[in-house]
Image (cartoon, coloured by chain):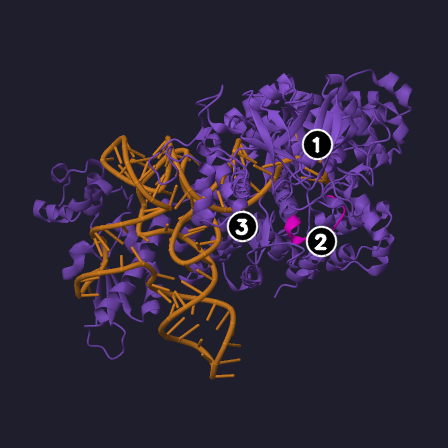
Amino acid sequence: MIDYSNIEKKWQDAWDKEKAFEVEPNDKESRLITAAFPYVNMPLHIGHLRTYATTDTYARYLRMRGFNVLFPMGFHASGIPILSIAKRIAKSDPELIEELKIFNIPDEDIKKMSDPLFIAEYFTNEMTESMKAAGFSIDWRRKFISIDPLFSKFVEWQFSKLKEKGYLEKGVHPVGWCTNDMSAIGQHDTLHDTHPEIEELTGIKFKDKDSEIFFVCTTYRPETIYGVTNLFVNKNSGYSIVEIKGEKFYVSKAAAASLSNQFELKILGEVTADALLKKNAINPETGESVPVFPGFFVKEGFGTGIVMSVPAHAPFDYVALEKLKSEGYNIPPESYKKVIAIPDKNKDGQSEGVDIPALAHLESIMGDSRSDYKLIEEATKKLYREEAHHGIMSIGKYEGKPESEARELIKKDMISSGTAISIYVIGNAEPVICRCGTEIIVKKVDQWFINYGNKAWKDDVRSFMSDMKVYPPQLKGAFNAASEWIGLRATERSQGLGTKFPYEPSHIIESLSDSTIYPVFYTIFPILKSDTIKSEQLKPEFFDFVVLNKGDVESISAETGIDVSTIKRCQESVNYWYVNTSRHSAPDLIYNHYMMYIYNHIAILPKKMWPKQVVVNGMVTYEGEKMSKSLGNVIPLLQGIKKYGADSVRFIELASADIGTDTNFTEEGIKSIEAKNNALYELVSSLDQYEAGSLSHIDYWLYSKLNSKIKKATESMDRLSFREAYTEIYYNSITEIKQYLDKGGKNQIVLKEFLDKLALMLQPIMPHIAEELWHVLGNNTFASKEKWPEADMQMINQEAEKIEEIIDSTEQDIKNAISLTSKTAKSETKKPKSINIIIAADWKAKAYDELASTKKISDVIDKVKGVDKATLSEFLSRFSKRLNSLEKENPVSSSQLKEGFEEAKEYLGSKFGAEIAIELEEESKSQRAKRALPTKPSIDVIW
RNA sequence: GCAGGGGUGGCAGAGCCUGGCCAAAUGCGACGGGCUUAGGACCCGUUCUCUUUAGUGGGUGCGAGAGUUCAAAUCUCUCCCCCUGCACCA
């Protein structure tokens, strides 16, 4: 049995002592392998391990392939969440404390977490310890935290470059806002971490027929303007008259308050709903005059508290009008104008024949009843979806266009002509509440953006994208799509940890924006630290020289007070490391971090430093379920490693699924790996019971397997297909060793070579056990620093493998034959006396291959010599039915095959408890002899 | 809605790019057997369906439908369904 925790500790200490993974530039080719650094507000769990272990395994592999590999790690503390946790701890938030306790954080540490810097430090240490326990080959001298003052200087430099290029812009943008805290809020600031969804609506201006005041109707579907029959207001609400940019509007009182956060708005006076209900309004698109009615469903706080009524296409409007009709309102049915048609597509959906789609949907969902609000909502959703998908405008200037297109066009037209305005609302079904208890509204705020939509920048990225390798390759599409899609990105925050925003020093830089080209910093950080450089010395000229090779080192040295030699060492380090990079993360970063990573590299760094490769690994589920705090199935990484062993956890997460798909972490999987490792360990420890000797057929077979395995595995590793590689290296090897031993293999030299190479190839993924096996095998170097085995193509022996394959399938056939014959055989022992294996004559192989290529029996009959034509044609006719599907077999000669079977005789004999005889077809007296095929010997079971 | 990914056997999950060796790897489950006092672990076999009964057979089949092809899980088109992301949140 392997004592996992003991050997893990042993090898981690040994690597540490030898500084095995601390690297400096040398004459080898460099590889800089980085993973997106973790955010230090919660401990790592076993799900996080996937990304970092993928990175480590890849780094360990490349190291073995002879590259000088740097795997650094830093920690991310910038931004709001840590601050938010500190605030909540200060208030003793029970929900949060509960969460922290899942991770076994001691009470006295939780108490100290009202200090955000303590949180950052605490989890930085916790994560470092976890990563060490996982056996990562990280150069820890390079560890830094994103709020380090030295790093801030680097970020400031980065922003000065963006500014120079004109990529920083100022503008207004809608954000979720708390009027009590007077600050922008995000998900972590809200009750139950609800994400406030901001939606853009169109507010269409309908002029009051008798005054210069406009009704502003908020709508998701401005294109239905052609079907408006009336407006709806809430008769129980109060309304205000407000002034925006010199125009006067009616909006509900509640709306007036929240809209003041989106517009410069003056409240001029009040007006009752009753007064509005007496009015008529002019449709700005059609010029029609329409009445104002009370609508039971109108929410005063949503949008403007006024909506337009399109009964043909809006179930709520239809129901409201029906209701009013029954109360005596005069509503002429011909006014229900259909403006969107669904072309008849010969399917059971609605056809052009339906006059009032809203009614049709109401009826199909709720029959004649109209009382259930939820069902009307459902009808609405269904109708909207259907029309958005298939609807065609049947009226207006965009007649004939799909509804979805017409919507955008009409909206744009109306806004530019001044007949509509954009209004933002919180789109969540339930109100979103700030942790302080106030309902969140939308505010338009003035702020700085990075404009990733900049045409020239995007063009550069676009033409670069195909140069960058993406693993798994099916994500290439997502990367391309994301790079097209990304546009304006707000880049400063009013609160949080991190670097001050240089152009608005009361704000800080948004936390993803400060971590884009940061892997560069790993290459210089230990030099800055060991030479005790102060942050104020890190002026922009320093980075210009070190990263961009610009400027004069003497004057920079004079300017900054940093030694020339230090500056030069930094520059050399950047130039050496930052050319071959591989970046790793989980898929949630594609649309944000990865895009910012790529764009910022291209904007700031010279072409040779642009990303070479990105790798995205899938997530981890636990026993088939998504890991989540609410399910209580989150296993902290340290605890998981202690319980299951670092190597087993690494292996199961990396090797049991393809890189891009989710892996399922199961205890059973862990157990099966442990069992296999134990078996391997026992075999390795008992190697001295075997002896060296001359090579037999089975030895050649094992050599052949080993070398073709190395070849296949190397190709898979190069593609980061760890599952494929380790199925070959691990699972298949174990089976092959078993087969080898079962079939009488016992050559110590062959076994040792196989196991040596197996141990080395296991090193990237299970480094501790690999080291252990490697040493027990008698080696005294670090497996971690050894060379990856190379395939000896000479040893790949197709014939040896083919013979073994034939023996295996013959074993199957014998089983079948025995079970079939046992029914008729008169045998008390249930075991046959003997089994004759009859190997096909060589001419059959020739004839078969000939047939497989020509597919014509008559041609083959003339070509094959050494057998009479009758026998030949009888043989060939067996394939007549499936001529087209015949494939060449590359069979081995009958004498070789016979030799192979002779060697396996003992094995087969013991398997079936019968005498085994091997005969050549020519020599056999058996009636069944002629049935033998080149790759399928005939079997004669004798009872 | 937009964008990206996907739909394969009882389940999970490969295969699809590069069509044929695919009734479809592997794992789990189920069934039968071995080992065992028993349970677990482990080992062997079966696990779409029909047929044959001394092994190399036939049918159906990879979301639905159509197409290309001598040949389609794999290529093309249409449709249906599922998952993920959509901005101030790391």
Residues in magenta, as a range: A38-49
Task: Give the numbered dot on residue A133.
Answer: 2
Q: Is residue A791 visible?
A: no
Pointer 2 or 1: first along the chain: 2
Q: Which amino acid does label 1 sit on?
A: Val
Q: Is residue A791 magenta?
A: no
Closer to the camera in the image, A654 or A301: A301
**CA distance for labels 2 and 3:** 62 Å
Which is more foreground, mark 2 or mark 1? 1
* Numbered disc 3: secondary structure: loop
User: Which shade of the palette goes to chain A?
Assistant: purple
**Chain hosting mark 3:** A
Q: Do the residues labelled 2 and 3 touch (CB within 8 Å)?
A: no
**Residue A43 colored in magenta in the image:** yes
**Which disc, if any, is residue A505?**
none
Residue A569 locus on image (x, y percent) = 80, 27
Give how far across and how far down residue B40 sits, in percent: 51, 72
Residue denoted by label 1: A251
Look at the magenta stretch and give its main secondary structure: loop
Q: What residue sits right under mark 3 in the picture?
A: A371
Query: Mark 2 or 3, which is nearer the eye?
Result: 3
Distance, label 3 to label 1, CA atoms, is: 28 Å
Supply the letter of whichever chain is orange: B
CA distance separating discs 2 and 1: 62 Å
For the C terminus of chain A, the quadrant is bottom left
Disc 3 crowd, CA 10 A, few/some/many (<14, 14-19, 20+): few
Residue at left 83%, top 52%?
A89
**CB under 8 Å between discs 2 and 1:** no
Q: What element carries label 1?
A: strand
